[in-house]
Amino acid sequence: MNVSASANPLDSSTVPSLPLMLESLPNPPVDERACPQRVRLQIDLMLLAIEALELGGSELFLAIAQELELQDIVKNRVNLWRMRCTNPLRRSHARRDLSLLEAKALVVIAADLARRLTAVIRQLLLTYQQMRDKQIPLEQNLRLSNYLERFRSHFRSRMNPRRSGVLAYNSPEKLDELALTLLQQLLFCTGTAGMQRLWISLFDGEVE
């Protein structure tokens, strides 16, 4: 008896495939249902830096998710908020896990936006370097000052001040340093295979 291909339960056409960008990120040897704490923290902070760079917040991330066909993972604003609240430093820390698939989707979104903002990120880092070399106060550059101010505001409003990890950034100078480090991370993922290198770097020290 002939069995049609459509009746075959193993027919590959019936199995939903992941977007190629997600498949390009290797699976580290960790529980795929639960990313390590440091990974959750770093991903959320990178998204926080993008929010300080580009107005739009959650709506911007959701639009990019739709464009990159990640809407089955990053479904809506509430879903996105819950994923970001797996960052243990957040005021609204969610006691849920962030899966590897969810983490990959957020990294892809961050990397795509970083690529679109490459010129802005490069200019801000160049400006910072020039001002530091000349010992000029950072607030004298409007664009850099605006980014740093927005980042400090976002961080203070969303992170739990009672957590030791937040207390480590108890001054504007330390928050500025964090904001600039995150810009360097975002720039890192705009180069050749940058997204993959960033993804792998997130797990440094987390796996054997």
Image (cartoon, helix red, strand yellow):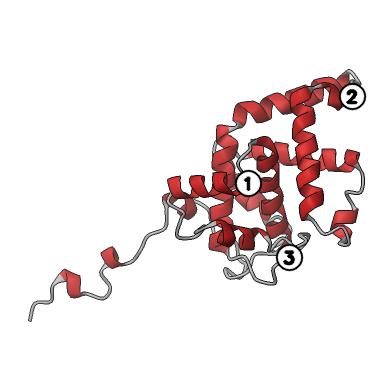
Residue 135 relative to residue 8: left or right: right
Q: Secondary structure at mark 1?
A: helix
Query: CB of mark 2 within 8 Å of CB of mark 3?
Result: no
Q: Residue at x 72, y 56 (%)?
A: 41
What type is the residue that disc 3 sits on?
A: His
Tell me the distance, in whole angstroms, between the alpha carbons under discs 1 and 2.
31 Å
Q: Residue at x 76, y 28 (%)?
A: 144
Q: Is residue 195 visible?
A: no
What type is the residue that disc 1 sits on?
A: Leu
Tell me the distance, in whole angstroms, between the alpha carbons under discs 2 and 3.
35 Å
Q: Residue at x 82, y 50 (%)?
A: 156
Please tell me in which quadrant of the rendered image residue 1 appears. Answer: bottom left
Tell me the distance, in whole angstroms, between the alpha carbons under discs 3 and 1.
24 Å
Residue tagged by mark 1?
198
Q: Residue furthest left?
A: 1
Residue 127 relative to residue 75: left or right: right
Residue 98 x, y percent position in the rendering = 62, 65
Please tell me in which quadrant of the rendered image residue 79 appears. Answer: bottom right
Residue 154 x, y percent position in the rendering = 76, 46
| Pick the front one: 152 or 125 | 152
Q: Quadrant of the C terminus?
A: bottom right
Residue tagged by mark 2?
137
Residue tagged by mark 3?
93
Nearest to the eye among marks 3 and 1: give it.
3
Q: Earlier in the sequence, mark 3 or mark 1?
A: 3
